[in-house]
Amino acid sequence: MNQIQPSQAPAIEVTDLQIEVMGANGSFAVVSEMNLSVRPGETLCIVGESGCGKSITALSLMRLLPDAAKITGGRLLIDGQDFLAMNQRQVEQFRGDKIAMIFQEPLTALNPVLRIGEQIAEGVREHRRCSRSEAHERAVDVLRLVQMPDPERRASQFPHELSGGMRQRAMIALALACEPKIIIADEPTTALDVTIQAQILGLISDLQKRLGTAQILITHDLGVVSEVADRVIVMYAGRKVEEASIYDLFDNPLHPYTIGLMGAVPGSGASSDAGDRLADIPGTVPPLWNLPKGCAFAPRCANASARCLEERPPLQEKRPGHWAACWEHDDAA
Amino acid sequence: MQPDRTPLLSVENLKVHFPIRSGVFQRQMGAVKAVDGVSFSLGRGETLSLVGESGCGKSTTGLALMGLVKPTGGRVRFDGNEIEGFKRSALKSYRRRMQIVFQDPFSSLNPRQRVKDIIRAPLDIHAVGTRAERDARVAELMQRVGLRPDQADNFAHQFSGGQRQRIGIARALALNPDIIVCDEPVSALDVSVQAQILNLLSDLQRDLGVSYLSISHDLGVVEFISHRVAVMYLGKIVEIAPKKTIFSTPLHPYTELLMRSAPSRDPRKRHSFSASNYDIPSATRKPSGCPFHPRCPLATDICKSDEPELTLRAGEQFVACHHR
């Protein structure tokens, strides 16, 4: 884990972000009251299950939301500048240069008819004053940085000619080409086999140590979280339900949803016997357009009280640096 | 529950080769040896997991045993009887006792069918009982897998992923099969729902004594669900052993690599993953000798020329490696 200087200003700072989606029956919030900040050299993991709002949060930080979704509130500072106030041209200048994204599925994120080297050089020429050949050299350099085997040859190949692991390396090279201050990675290893996932996780933490980027990693996999995170945000139904340092979260999870998630991962017990049961979480995630009145997790929570069904618990600092949105630990503050 | 180890299913030297054709006349230029000589047995009430990375042949093995792809060679004995050449007639009675649950509950259920018709289909095909008996059986199955029988008239698309997987399991259970092939049954599901389905599978085995041939790439799932584990690499089994043995003392270097690659669950015990790159070779360009030798830290000359046989080491642990 990197030593983070507390004095360093955050590379990215999000305050009270609210995202709404226009549905057939009016609009509804998919992300509410989202606050986060990441300093240079720090890795923040956002973890949660499908539909919790983690990916749409990531897209909003890049201002890449689909047409149906809109940021309806909050502030987003990138490198001290108000990203939401910028016009399209300024946004495009920022994107790729200051903040870049690694997507889950490199095969759909990469342009299939452009050679790898051209795709990377294109971004470099967009943001840096340089010649075509200098941009190409930079492309080969970043391919070498991500330990692409035979980078000169790979630069002249098309995405379909690369294996899944190599495509993800190419995606990472593309994101790194202009040395952004912030990298957002949305499930960067989910589509990969476990031995390749290990290589890519190794690469991501290696690069971060060398380049000192601020990193936001979106994942559903607590194993990945425990390998790379400095700090973790757990999301449920569009809201942050817990935030803590990686050690506090794994040693002492406070929110029943976090506790449930940790228990539900098979293989986390010492050595399970066939016939044992996992601690599952009953029920399913509620639809965002029809959230229960109180705490969104209450219908699935074993400890839910009458208050939980009526009133939504606010996110509170229960212990120093450890935040949770649950009535249960009200006295722990 | 301790499973009965008399083999219910025994598979010998199973091969599935797909021809590679090219040119104007579509001449066969070679073959993808997706499954290339796989042997194992499965006891009553036992769970055997086939584990490995994409392209190792684990799913093809499952599909071949269901008769959904035609094997190129090998012998399959089910309850003492050989399945002759996977002919239609032989398959029908065999499939009655062997069913499959697919990975993706979104594409494996017909969105235009009502749930009751999906679950009834196997009963109709095999003409089991009267109409009323079939309806009663559907209600019983829905209850058994944790669905409300009053949802029987709903369509598959009205259900969440986890509920759809329950429908798939109910359909597989309809004929009281002896074996269910579970092809990555939880890998498309969220963690909390995944745990519900794994618990359901484990309850069903306890109550009904059904055997599972589970196909998975997730070592956590494998450790939870299996009695025995077979590790596959490029169409072959490289190690097969009881679960506890293989997790505590893996012998094959590939098994070790798999276990080392799984993320830790303790942030204080992080792996120092190497960023180095070794790609998984494909079954079309299979390395000579031991297929794992280009990635293997123990590889010597013999590994490049001679393919090691799966042989018995300690206890019930079979390993295919020259050096272990």
Image: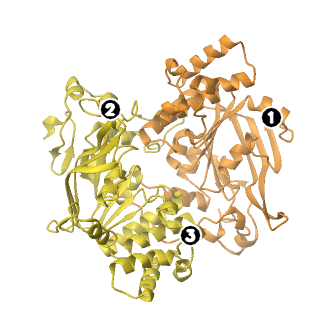
Chain colours: A yellow, B orange
Which of the two discs, 2 and 1, sits closer to the camera? 2
Based on the displayed image, in which of its 4 quarters is residue B11 positioned? top right
Which secondary structure, mark 3? loop
Residue sitting at 26 percent across and 27 percent down?
A304
**Which residue lies at the image location 65% right of the left edge and 24% below the top edge?**
B174
Q: Chain of mark 1?
A: B
Q: Find residue B252 and name its label.
A: none
Task: Say which amino acid is labelled 1.
Answer: Leu
Secondary structure beneath disc 1?
helix
Q: Is residue B104 visible?
A: yes
Amino acid type, residue under disc 3 in the picture:
Tyr
Mark 1, residue position? B91
The residue identified by callout 2 is A290
Query: Is residue A90 placed above or below A48 in the rendered structure?
Result: below
Q: Quadrant of the C terminus of chain A?
A: top left
Nearer to me, A311 or B275 = A311
| Residues at circles 3 and 2 in contact by the CB criterion of under 8 Å | no
Tell me residue B285's x, y (percent): 71, 68
